[in-house]
Amino acid sequence: MSFPRPVLRSASRSVFAAAFRVRAPIRNATAVRYNSSTPGPAKNNSLVYAAVGLALLGGGYYYYSSNIVKPKPAALSKPFVPTYEDYKKVYNKVADSLDAGDYDDGSYGPVLIRLAWHASGTYDAKTNSGGSSGATMRFVPESGHGANNGLDIARNVLEPIHAEFPWISYGDLWTLGGVCAVQEMGGPTIKWRPGRADADASSCTPDGRLPDGAKGADHIRDIFYRMGFNDQEIVALAGAHALGRCHTNRSGFEGPWTFAPTYLTNDYYTLLLNDKWHWKKWNGPAQYEDDKTKSLMMLPADMALVKDKNLKKYVEKYAKSQDAFFEDFAKAFSKLLELGVSFKPGQEYWEFPVSS
């Protein structure tokens, strides 16, 4: 508690006044004690006065120091809590990194979508393990799983961005990178929210949880049902094959699915339904080749979508309407990116505008 200076002064005067009131009896006592023919020792009086003065000074300092206003310690800095604007900066930085004249068809977009897909598609609903939380593809053995071949390219593209924004988890960065790639390549707006926490190598998922392009409808359902998807969502997510291409040094397969592998459309479905396909004659694994140009390919898992009656009806739906495809894909992709994530209560969804 502090006092204005006038109060301190009056208080000091009161202390000194009280001291001087004590001093008179001391002087009288000395006069009585040495009232003889021998003079009293004058030095003793000086020592007494000096002692009283020091006591008063000490008391005054104690009084002042006890009542002075002491500065409060500086408040500890609050932990950084990123906002929408912070994540938007990350989105824009990813968008700036997509162009790649020396890679595939000139864009890293397709491989970033594949990274987000494979980081999320390891989820097992029964055991509540895997999914986009953890980003365990950073570690062996998951980074070496056959389905993840070549995804070191995508991780390396995003690593400088993580270095610039070290507060973002790898799980959030990889999934936001996938959202950015979809939107920047002409796809629908994807709702996204942060909240994925990274894990260590002990949380790596077992091999075999991702789709195998060489297999048919039963395998596809086993994989996607394990994650919690239905037939309609399976076909909607398969539309991402409109983007990118296969590589013999990764999956063993070769070639793009569509003529515009860096722009998301519903062409994947129209080509499946309307073009003629035959088995490709080559030394690689079994895959289909289009009759007209022999430049496009389809995997056995792709052709399974038109051979299965229930799956085919959704292929037909999306081939007729790109709007319908975009609407269902946006929902299914957002759901995929959230598998296995425990979000904080009230964490809102965000949408990011396409970069200018």
Image: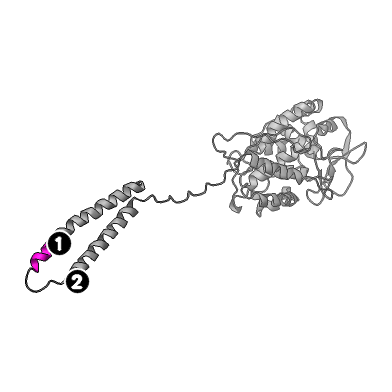
Q: Nearer the viewer, residue 17 or 155?
A: 17
* First of labels 2, 1 by sequence position: 1
Residue 355 percent coordinates (x, y): 75, 38
**Horizontally, is 134 left or right of 289 in the view?**
left
Residue 286 percent coordinates (x, y): 83, 44
Q: Nearer the viewer, residue 76 or 334?
A: 76
Decide: few, some or many residues near mark 2? Use Cα within 10 Å; few <14, some 14-19, many ≥20: few
Q: CA distance from mark 2 to mark 1?
A: 14 Å
Residue 322 percent coordinates (x, y): 79, 28
44 relative to 310, above or below: below
Instruction: Name the residue at 8% across, 65% down.
Output: 32
181 relative to 322, above or below: below
Tell me which corner region of the image, top left, top right, bottom left or bottom right, holds residue 98: top right
Q: Secondary structure at mark 2?
A: helix
Decide: few, some or many residues near mark 1? Use Cα within 10 Å; few <14, some 14-19, many ≥20: few
What's the residue type where badge 1 is placed?
Ile
Q: Is residue 91 magenta?
A: no
For disc 2, the marked residue is 43
Q: Visible in this render: residue 316?
A: yes
**Horizontally, is 110 left or right of 347 in the view?**
right
For disc 1, the marked residue is 26
Q: Where does the magenta region start and end?
A: 27-34
Tell me which corner region of the image, top left, top right, bottom left or bottom right, holds residue 19: bottom left
Q: Residue at the bottom extreme?
A: 38
Instruction: Name the residue at 69% across, 33% down.
Output: 332
Q: Visible in this render: residue 313?
A: no
What's the residue type where badge 2 is placed?
Lys
Number of numbered tags placed on the structure image:
2
